[in-house]
């Protein structure tokens, strides 16, 4: 009995020594791995290393605790990537997608679309079926859309040019006063000769006030056919009803597209650069007087590049008919601008 007990004790001691040895060796290896990871943040792994950890993660539940060189999520990502690759290879087909259309069929579709611009894809598809050509309507639509697009709509420049004699544009211009109060200038511009036909100033713009300005700008039967404006909330329902009752059709610009109302926007810029940026406005009465003088100069004297350097109201050429004539200067807008003519010397 004593001999058996001694043998069991020796066996257990050897067993514990092996476990202690393996534990110490494991700690030493892990410490070396930690030092290696500290010196090299991201070691390069081969395909065999990835396969090893992927297989080990399937058979060893505690594989996460011993993983040092990579993150556990990286191993899981390898598994997902391998899963996608496996099913992609398995589901891969030699003939994927729709069968290719012959160039003859494509050219025939384009020929029918060009010869019949009023036909859409359904009618062209039906005609092809009568010719014995098996093709889907969606394929016909795609061929037409990619190779034979519909003619584009006329540009805003073309539209405005074609309707210029019958169109006016309206807009608001903000001018600050010397007391930091905001005044709103409402301008009405005829496109035909870039002539300002009406303006007014207010500190509290509203739809009813704007509608009254349209009535004052076009009394009796002088209303234009089209009115171009932006989508400002000031042009509310009362304004729209007044314009409609006068037989005027409104043309609205797109959101945040001031270039579609280019003429009146250019006018607003000219007012700022040539007038309001050079004066200090006291009140509404003062601004009205200044703008009245500027618009007189704008319509009668100011040259426009779009009008072959002529003012909106045609200005006759002043000629030197005698040697005694001299060029005289007439101040406009308080001396900001001038008009020059030949006149007899005093």
Image (spheres, rainbow, N blue to C red):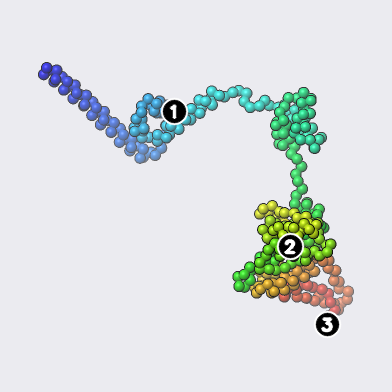
Q: Are marks 3 and 1 in contact (CB under 8 Å)?
A: no
Q: CA distance from mark 3 to mark 2?
A: 50 Å
Circle 3 SS class: loop
- In the picture, measured across the screen, residue 85 lies left or right of residue 226, that is left
Whether the residues at callouts 1 and 2 have beta carbons within 8 Å, the answer is no
Q: Which residue is mark 3?
A: 346
| Viewer-side residue, 52 vs 6 | 6
- Residue 5 occupies which quadrant of the picture? top left
Q: Could you say which quadrant of the image residue 316 lies in? A: bottom right
Considering only order in the chain, which callout, 2 or 1, is on the residue closer to the N terminus? 1
Q: Is residue 346 above or below residue 89?
A: below
Q: Dot 2 lies on which element? A: helix
In the rendered view, tell whether residue 346 sits above or below residue 169: below
Judge left or right: residue 224 versus residue 19: right
First in sequence: mark 3 or mark 1? 1
Kindly identify the residue that appears in the image at 75 percent across and 69 percent down: 295
Q: Which residue is mark 2?
A: 211
């Amino acid at each position: 009995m004593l001999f058996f007990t001694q043998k069991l004790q020796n066996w257990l001691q050897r067993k514990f020594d092996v476990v202690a040895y393996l534990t110490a060796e494991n700690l030493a290896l892990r410490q070396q791995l930690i030092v290696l990871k500290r010196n090299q943040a991201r070691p390069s792994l081969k395909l065999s290393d990835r396969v090893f950890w992927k297989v080990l993660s399937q058979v060893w539940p505690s594989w996460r605790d011993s993983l040092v060189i990579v993150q556990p999520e990286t191993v899981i990502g390898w598994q997902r990537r391998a899963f996608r690759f496996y099913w992609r290879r398995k589901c891969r087909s030699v003939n994927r997608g729709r069968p290719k259309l012959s160039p003859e069929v494509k050219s025939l579709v384009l020929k029918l679309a060009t010869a019949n611009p009023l036909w859409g894809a359904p009618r062209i598809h039906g005609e092809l079926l009568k010719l014995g050509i098996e093709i889907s309507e969606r394929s016909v639509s795609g061929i037409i859309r990619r190779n034979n697009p519909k003619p584009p709509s006329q540009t805003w420049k073309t539209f405005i040019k074609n309707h210029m004699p019958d169109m006016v544009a309206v807009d608001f211009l903000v001018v600050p006063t010397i007391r930091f109060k905001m005044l709103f200038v409402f301008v009405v511009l005829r496109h035909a000769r870039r002539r300002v036909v009406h303006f007014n100033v207010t500190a509290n713009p509203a739809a009813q006030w704007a509608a009254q300005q349209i009535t004052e700008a076009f009394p009796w039967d002088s209303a234009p056919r089209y009115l171009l404006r932006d989508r400002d909330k000031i042009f509310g329902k009362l304004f729209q009803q007044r314009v409609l009752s006068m037989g005027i059709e409104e043309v609205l610009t797109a959101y945040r597209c001031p270039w579609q109302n280019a003429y009146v926007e250019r006018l607003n810029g000219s007012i700022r650069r040539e007038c309001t940026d050079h004066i200090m406005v006291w009140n509404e009465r003062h601004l009205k007087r200044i703008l009245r003088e500027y618009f007189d100069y704008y319509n009668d004297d100011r040259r426009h590049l779009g009008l072959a350097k002529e003012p909106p109201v045609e200005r006759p050429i002043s000629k030197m008919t005698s040697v005694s004539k001299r060029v005289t200067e007439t101040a406009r807008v308080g001396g900001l601008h001038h008009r020059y003519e030949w006149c007899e010397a005093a």
